[in-house]
Amino acid sequence: MSNMEKLILITNDDSVNAKGIHSLVKMASKLGRVVVVAPDKPQSGMGHAITLADPIRLNRVGMFGDVEAYASSGTPVDCVKLAIYEVLERKPDLVLSGINHGENSSTNVLYSGTMSAAIEGAMEGLPSIGLSLSNYDSDADFMQYESYIERLIAAALSNSFPKHTCLNVNIPNVEASHIKGIKVCTQAHAFWEDRFDKREDQFGRPYYWLTGKFGEVNPREDSDLHALNSGFISIVPTQFDLTNYSVLNDFISWDL
Amino acid sequence: MSNMEKLILITNDDSVNAKGIHSLVKMASKLGRVVVVAPDKPQSGMGHAITLADPIRLNRVGMFGDVEAYASSGTPVDCVKLAIYEVLERKPDLVLSGINHGENSSTNVLYSGTMSAAIEGAMEGLPSIGLSLSNYDSDADFMQYESYIERLIAAALSNSFPKHTCLNVNIPNVEASHIKGIKVCTQAHAFWEDRFDKREDQFGRPYYWLTGKFGEVNPREDSDLHALNSGFISIVPTQFDLTNYSVLNDFISWDL
């Protein structure tokens, strides 16, 4: 078995102390040898940040029991780089990021630290999956979705994985027994309809709280939001070329 | 003229104190009424972060002379949202972000605060441009590129701008007299070839510095990196749907 054993790197953006990563380690450990390299503090909303101006710390930690694990002062993307170039003896067979406490569907992929780690894995040419649960509770029950996530990890390890692509997986906030299945989707064309709540502090000076509602602009039946709202787990094949090829000629006609 | 006057919102990620935004305000003020809403401190590498857990401050500042300007404690994306929903009396005709002290070509677009502000503008359905100079010097000479940037802003204000798309503009670090022109490009397929420099602190504990070299994997003549290396200003039409449509069927065949 040892020659065949799959090497699975796990990271996240909620830190080594989050319940979501501990649940994911338990699930993935049945399918290969897991090594954890994850942030030592929450890094939600860090987007694709990397640490350039500061040194990065990396310390072995014991909170995952028998599983080899390291906590880093870096961002989720730093953790993937450190794992590949400093920790692991070979490139991993799979990079998993999560399970995030909160949804990363639709355009939220752009500012998700969870998905940035998965995208970094894809940039390195590795099969990578970011996983999120539409539940922000620090004590959410992730293990109830084990059969779905195990099936997905097993499929990722046994099928050929398209190069320079990762998966954005979101689980709706419904009981596992009500999940209708897993759907391959497109990224919803949705936005925050932002508003600000303007208040005054104790000195009469204004401050603002961001508020708003997430809504789909052009609702599509194949979108991740539609799947989640219908009780499905959504998976969106995600790449990192933002070029809008369809309008190149519009700008060429500007004749700059 | 007043009815026809264009309203131009300017932000950045290097803060209201950076030379790059002051140069951009000077250039844009010739083409419309400029309002500045920008971070009160540097926010480089913030990616598409937004501030949800903290209140955001917004204060009128005077360092832009006659130009109406506000400094915010929020991220570049927060600044765009605040400007649209709290500061401006109507939607701006153009959102400009920059000029960034440093290059944001190729995959760097993913962790650029400058480009995130432009992408946020595009999400709001507004014509938006992020501008960066391949020079990290805080005292770089931005004004020498004025004729190119003015031509670009004028074109953006007079042509129809494709919806939900922004421009990622990068200026190579060569003297303006050596610029060969402006080229519409695709995002280069390039990556950091990362390595870490492992050192020891004064207590013998290890720390890591990220180092590495940026290289194009599949060099293409139409890429932004190729244009910059050839002395052209690159402009890449940029959108925010990361779905890899070409591999949807690969994953559907996994039969999850």
Image (spheres, coloured by chain):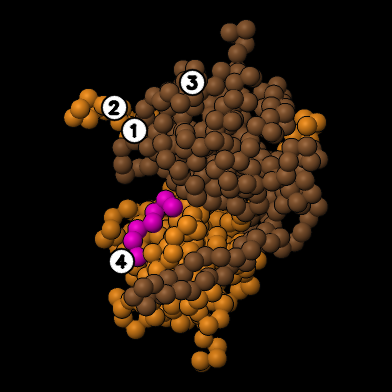
Chain colours: A brown, B orange
Between circles 3 and 4, the one closer to the viewer is 3
Q: What residue appears at the point 48 percent right and 74 percent down from the top-left corner?
A: A198
* Label 3 CA crowd tier, 10 Å (few <14, some 14–19, many 20+): few
Foreground residue, A60 or B21?
Answer: A60
Q: Which residue is mark 3?
A: A65
Numbered disc 3: what chain? A
Between circles 4 and 1, the one closer to the viewer is 1
B185 vs B35: above or below: above
Q: Which residue is mark 2?
A: B206
The amino acid marked with disc number 1 is Arg
Highlighted magenta segment, given as a residue range? B36-46
- Residue B45 highlighted magenta (yes or no): yes
| Element at label 4 | loop
The amino acid marked with disc number 3 is Gly
Between circles 3 and 1, the one closer to the viewer is 3
Does the residue at mark 4 contact the one at mark 1 (Cβ under 8 Å)? no
Callouts 4 and 2 in the same chain:
yes
What is the chief secondary structure element of the magenta stretch?
A: loop
Q: Which residue is mark 1?
A: A57
| Element at label 1 | loop
**In the rendered picture of this protein, how many numbered marks are placed on residues?**
4
* Label 1 CA crowd tier, 10 Å (few <14, some 14–19, many 20+): some
Please tell me in which quadrant of the rendered image residue B123 appears: bottom right
